[in-house]
Image (cartoon, rainbow, N blue to C red):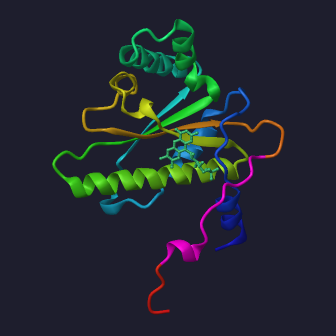
């Protein structure tokens, strides 16, 4: 592994708080281009991205707030406003979805894996560009209101919402502890 690749992989962190300054579209396109270079069995090109900025974040956030209101009747209006503003925590939110492969469970699994690998590429590309990002999912990923707002089809699935922005001043969060290689590897024939 080159020092640069190692530094990118080990230096990347999930960062939730970022500056509100908008990002150039070309920069976001570069991140998505990194994603579509992930491994992809049979080159099915299963990824679908919705790159949200400005008011488009609000529209999806309001769809999420409608889902919360449906699931939790009586949720206070202030709480719903907070839900509606969720996507405004970063200037750019990239919804990363996998196109459905109905009737082909092997392809569906492999396609989703390819999109997940693409998300990691995207995160590493963002880090290499000096940006801060976080992969979020949670209940939002399955809410029909959010899926409709993103234009997902019946068989499509939302793999992650990647929030991206420029980092705020200050040290990045410390790396979370990870297991030693030997704790997760069954070495055979070495
Ligand atoms: C599939 C997936 C979903 C995630 N969803 C969330 C989320 O909803 N909220 C969140 O704060 N972090 C989320 N994360 C980020 C993880 O919490 C984060 O990667 C983990 O804490 C390790 O930190 P690091 O990325 O800085 O190494 C998600 C990560 C993955 C892979």
Q: Residue at x 76, y 46 (%)?
A: 172
Q: Is residue 38 visible?
A: yes
| Residue extending furthest toward the bottom | 189
* Screen quadrant of the N terminus: bottom right
Main SS of the magenta part reads loop
Ligand 1, seen in the image, is in the quarter at top right
Q: Residue 68 versus residue 34: which sits nearer the camera?
A: 68
Residue 117 among those drawn in magenta: no
Q: Position of residue 96 (x, y in %)?
A: 45, 40
At a point 25% along the width and 38% down the height, the residue shown is: 155
Answer above or below: position of 25 versus 174.
Answer: above
Q: Is residue 145 left or right of residue 155?
A: right
Stretch in magenta: 172-185
Q: Position of residue 86 (x, y in %)?
A: 56, 24
Q: Residue furthest right?
A: 170
Relative to 184, is 110 on the left or the right?
left
Question: Residue, x 39% and y 11% (percent of image)?
Answer: 73
């Amino acid at each position: 592994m080159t020092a640069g690749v190692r530094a990118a992989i080990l230096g990347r962190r999930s960062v939730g708080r970022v500056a509100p300054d908008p990002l150039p579209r070309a920069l976001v396109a570069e991140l998505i281009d990194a994603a579509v270079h992930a491994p992809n069995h049979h080159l099915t090109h299963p990824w679908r991205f919705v790159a949200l900025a400005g008011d488009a974040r609000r529209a999806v956030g309001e769809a999420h707030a409608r889902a919360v209101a449906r699931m939790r009747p009586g949720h206070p209006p202030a709480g719903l406003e907070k839900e509606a503003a969720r996507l405004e925590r970063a200037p750019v939110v990239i919804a990363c979805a996998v196109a459905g492969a109905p009737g082909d469970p092997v392809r569906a699994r492999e396609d989703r894996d390819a999109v997940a690998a693409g998300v990691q590429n995207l995160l590493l590309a963002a880090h290499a560009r000096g940006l801060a990002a976080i992969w979020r999912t949670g209940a939002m990923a399955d809410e029909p209101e959010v899926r409709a707002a993103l234009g997902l089809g019946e068989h499509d699935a939302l793999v992650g919402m990647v929030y991206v922005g420029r980092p705020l001043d200050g040290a990045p969060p410390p790396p979370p502890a990870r297991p030693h290689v030997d704790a997760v590897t069954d070495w055979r024939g070495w």
